[in-house]
Image (spheres, helix red, strand yellow):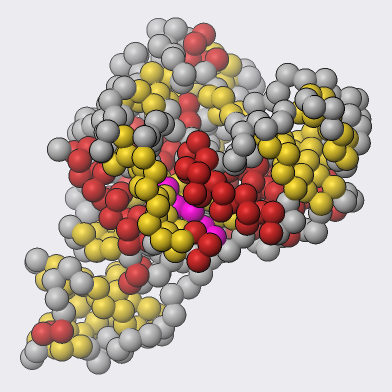
Amino acid sequence: MGGGQTEVAGPDLRAGVPAADLQEGVSVLGHFDGEPVLLVRLKDGVSAVGATCTHYGGPLHEGVVAGGTVHCPWHHACFDLRTGETLEAPALADLPTYRVHEADGRVRVTEKLAPPPTLTAGAKARGKKPASSPSSVVILGGGAAGNAAAEALRREGYAGPVVIVESDPDSPCDRPNLSKDYLQGSAPEEWIPLHPARFYEDNGIEVRRDTAVRIDRKKRAVKLQGGDALPYGALILALGAEPVRPDMPIADGSRVLTLRTLSDSRAIIRAAESAKRAVIIGASFIGLEVAMSLRHRQLEVHVVAPEELPLARVMGPDLGRFVKALHEEKGVHFHLGRKAKAIGRDLVTLDDGTEVPADFVVLGVGVRPRVALAQEAGLEVEDGIVVGSDLRTSDEAIWAAGDVASFPYAPTGGRVRIEHWAFAERMGAAAARSVLGKRGRFGAAPFFWSQHYDAVICYVGHAREWDEAALDGNPAQRDCAVRFSKSGRQLALATIFRDEASLAAEIKLEASAEA
């Protein structure tokens, strides 16, 4: 995984800093043996951890310290300041930790501590022991939720068999990157795997390249396409979602692509190498990120969508206008208020008769949850697999997480199904903890980020409906926040380069969910 690296700055912590300069809950950036280190005074002493987020290298000293944790400003990963342990996705590993000595009015870092060799060893070192240990845990799906569930089982000290069943040979991988830097050509392929294969071997996680075809709830076993039957003590359904393909005439020989996997992203890159023009059907976040990436590759790009303003339903009219203007400034052609009627070998026909030349087409009209396996097994399904607040399905031995799960959302009441990468990771980890006997209500705040050239939009919360979208600041200056409210109650916040406000909103939403 690639990314940034926090600059070495501030005081040399081997020499130390005056103890009086450390205020409780306020981080100090320094360095130790050439590595950036975050020093924080907590109620029970001073902690020192690495200052670089293990996701994309975000600068943790610019994040938020709260309740013994530090939150990354870029993509909201969260770490324990005492142990360095990753507490919330999308962090990929724990932070390094350092020994601290306080004496004679100074606080010094004396050595870097060696990390435990595996997640299970780390759990043992921290005294973690599951309240419940099923005979085995099988996870169907190796995407965000499935991978996070497997990791969380080991982080919580579960020592039984863990099997991920995933047919995609490239999963688990960094899916958000597939429509951004990787598709643009600025991120090498070695950045895409979430972990090297050795990680799963070292942590006793078996990744089975196969497809589940049936769940036998009576025998508690999963039948695989390859013929094997996997018994389970607990089953986690992290099946994800699949791209929607519109019902329209598509000519033989036309190149119609979707983007969900690394293989899909490679296919778009291959198509772009010999093409001059591309049509994106759908002005979704994925659709617009693909448009951005193809413009980086100097293709002529057209976006067709039925709405009058892209993203306005989710982001409001102010950000919708900004995103449209930004893409147009970069050369994207919009055909809004229009639907694609047919796809020919070298053009797309719109519902008003307009013909748009296309060497290839990318569909970005949304996804639908993969619920067929659950339906056939007799699980309750309604716009996703229905789960309770502890992410358990209608079967006591089966849990569901990620894009496929329909769960009770406390801030608004009712059920929602959310298709965000980091949120799916957090849900997968929560499902794993529930399997191991931690029955608390799942209360993570939904969060996602979307990149549009030099503007990164962060969105916290969930506002399916809202009656006010209040703009503070100026999107064109890459400095704004939009607060989405209904009946005077704030439900979500979208920001551009207001990281502290975004983190504060997330922390507040999660605190209200726990109340």
Q: Residue at x 70, y 25 (%)?
A: 245
Q: Residue at x 13, y 71 (%)?
A: 24
Q: Position of residue 413 (x, y in %)?
A: 28, 25
Q: Residue at x 58, y 16 (%)?
A: 213
Asked whether residue 281 appears in the rendered view, the answer is yes
Above or below, comparing residue 375 to residue 84 in the picture: above
Above or below, comparing residue 28 to residue 147 in the picture: below
Q: Which quadrant: the N terminus? A: bottom right
State the extent of the magenta-drawn residues as a range: 455-460
Q: Main secondary structure of the magenta part?
A: strand
Q: Position of residue 331 (x, y in %)?
A: 74, 56
Above or below, comparing residue 159 to residue 299 in the picture: above
Name the one closer to the observer, 155 or 495. Answer: 495
Is 457 a magenta residue? yes
Q: Position of residue 377 (x, y in %)?
A: 47, 9
Name the one closer to the observer, 372 or 166. Answer: 372
Does 166 sit left or right of 459 as displayed? right
Q: Residue at x 34, y 83 (%)?
A: 31
Q: Position of residue 471 (x, y in %)?
A: 40, 52
